Structure formats: structure tokens, C-alpha cells
Image (cartoon, rainbow, N blue to C red):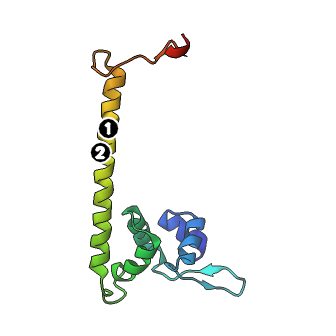
Amino acid sequence: MRIGEVAEQAGVSVRALRYYEEQGLLGATRTGGGQRQYPDGAVARVRMIQQLYAAGLASRLVREVLPRCMNEGPSPVGFSDSLITERARIDRQIGDLTAVRARLDEIIAVATDPSHPHHSHPVRGGIAASTA
């Protein structure tokens, strides 16, 4: 398959396919005219790459787990450990974002509720109170 065919069938850009090649995630041969030629399983491989990226995995980890996800051999040593570590990192990010959202909710409450004990009006009518 040529690059445009793979891109269309997989629902990705040609640029994405070139990036996957650069990252060592997708291989292609070249025709005599220099055009990329992808193997039959390229579309399925690209879809799996997309799923791994959508799961928040970095290229390094995608490269590590992709062969196993494509049933291209036994699991490398530490395969599941890497994924569990990545999941823990995502859990920490979720916790951090939840705390940030709670702080933002507090700010919204103060800013929008005139009866809130911490509510003040530093800006009135578009002019800062200190210049009014």
C-alpha cells in the first residue's frame, strides 16, 4: 500500500505516518521511484499506535509495547511493569488536576457570589477600584 492509501484507511495524516516511521513504529520499503510501500498490516498497526498514543503513552513506551500489542512476539521483560508505572503517573495527574479544579471552583464561588465572605469588587464597570 502507498502512504496515501494507508493514511486514508487508518484515518491519519501522511505526516503522522512519516512521524511513526521516524519513531521506529512503522516500517516501509521504497519503490524504485522512491515511494513508500507499506505492508498489508500497516493500517491495523497505525490504528494500534493511535490507541496507544490516545492512552497517553510516550513514543518510547509505544515503541516498547507495540510489538506485544500486535502479537509480534513474547512480552519483553518489564512489559506490564512499564504500563503499570504509566497508569500510576496518570493517576497522579488526575489527582493533581482534581485539586486544581477544586481550587478553581472556590475562586469561581468567590468571584460570582456577592454574599461570599471573601467576595470583593476590585473591578467595577471595567475600571480598577484603585483608579476609580
Q: Residues within 10 Å of mark 2 (few under 14, many from 20)?
A: few
Q: Which residue is mark 1?
A: 103
Q: Is residue 125 shown above or below 11? A: above
Nearer to me, 4 or 82: 82
Residue at point 32% right, 41% down?
101
SS class of the residue under badge 2?
Answer: helix
Position in image of residue 69 (x %, y %) = 34, 78
Residue in view at x 34 percent, y 43 percent: 100
- Residue for point 30% across, 83% down: 78
Q: Quadrant of the N terminus?
A: bottom right
Q: Secondary structure at mark 1?
A: helix
- Amino acid found under the numbered disc labelled 2: Ala
Q: Give the side of residue 108 with respect to residue 124, left or right.
A: left
Q: Residues within 10 Å of mark 1 (few under 14, many from 20)?
A: few
The residue wearing badge 2 is 99
Q: Position of residue 84 (x, y in %)?
A: 27, 71
Picture residue at 34% right of the left edge, 82% below the top: 68
**Residue 7 placement: quadrant:** bottom right
Asked if the residues shown at circle 1 and circle 2 are in contact, with their CB atoms under 8 angstroms apart, the answer is yes
Q: Name the quadrant containing residue 53.
A: bottom left
